Amino acid sequence: MKIENNKKVWFTSDSHASHRNIIKYCNRPFKSVEEMNAKLIENWNALIEPGGLTFHLGDFCFGTIENWKDFRSQLNGDIILIKGNHDKFQNGQIKHLFLDVFDFLEIDVLDDDANQGWQHITLCHYALKVWNRSHHGSYSLHGHSHGTLPDDPNSLSFDVGVDCREYKPISYNHVKEIMATKTFKPPAPR
């Protein structure tokens, strides 16, 4: 998938909207699920314009399909969902809420600074050690770990989940800034 407007591209993961226990499990600073949902929506809409595109890397919402519809209806922009382990609904039940739904996705973002003018990014709910084109400057973004995995300064990969990002999505340009601080070192051959 080719993305031509990198200024309106965002990434996030693990919002866990309407999930009461995530407040306790991840020590989120909210007194209720209603407060958490409201803050997630406020943070999202403060950053993402109606024309923006967000890649949500899984664990979008909990509860009924009505919970999903309510949460999604309050978020600006288009969303492509990369399903996480808690996204239990069948694609047919949730696909109408999103631009598209995938289990895994590779994208190319138009960027004059990137190799041949396109930055390749692998999107998966789970952290990967290696991925397509990882030896050629490709990025890998993930969620799932809620900030519990230590960041590897030698890997062009990191967790975009809300627990790592002040409960906010992260822009493509911010991703690019973080990756510029890393030095890629391939895993040692066996």
Image: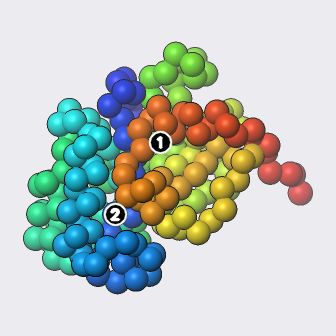
Give the residue at x 47% y 49%: 123
The quadrant holding residue 68 is bottom left
For label 2, the residue is 15
Res 92 label: none
Query: In the picture provided, is 179 more to the left or to the right than 56?
Result: right
Residue neighbourhood size for the residue with mark 1, other residues' Cα within 10 Å, grouped as few (<14), some (14–19), many (≥20) = some
Residue 60 visible at all: yes
Query: In the picture provided, is 128 more to the left or to the right than 36?
Result: right
Residue 90 visible at all: no
Query: In the picture provided, is 156 more to the left or to the right than 162?
Result: right
For label 1, the residue is 106
| Mark 2 residue element | loop
Residue 22 vertical placement versus 114 (above, below)? below
Q: CA distance from mark 2 to mark 1?
A: 21 Å
Colouring chosen for the image of the structure: rainbow
The quadrant holding residue 59 is bottom left
Give the residue at x 22% y 46%: 45
**N-term mark: 2 or 1:** 2
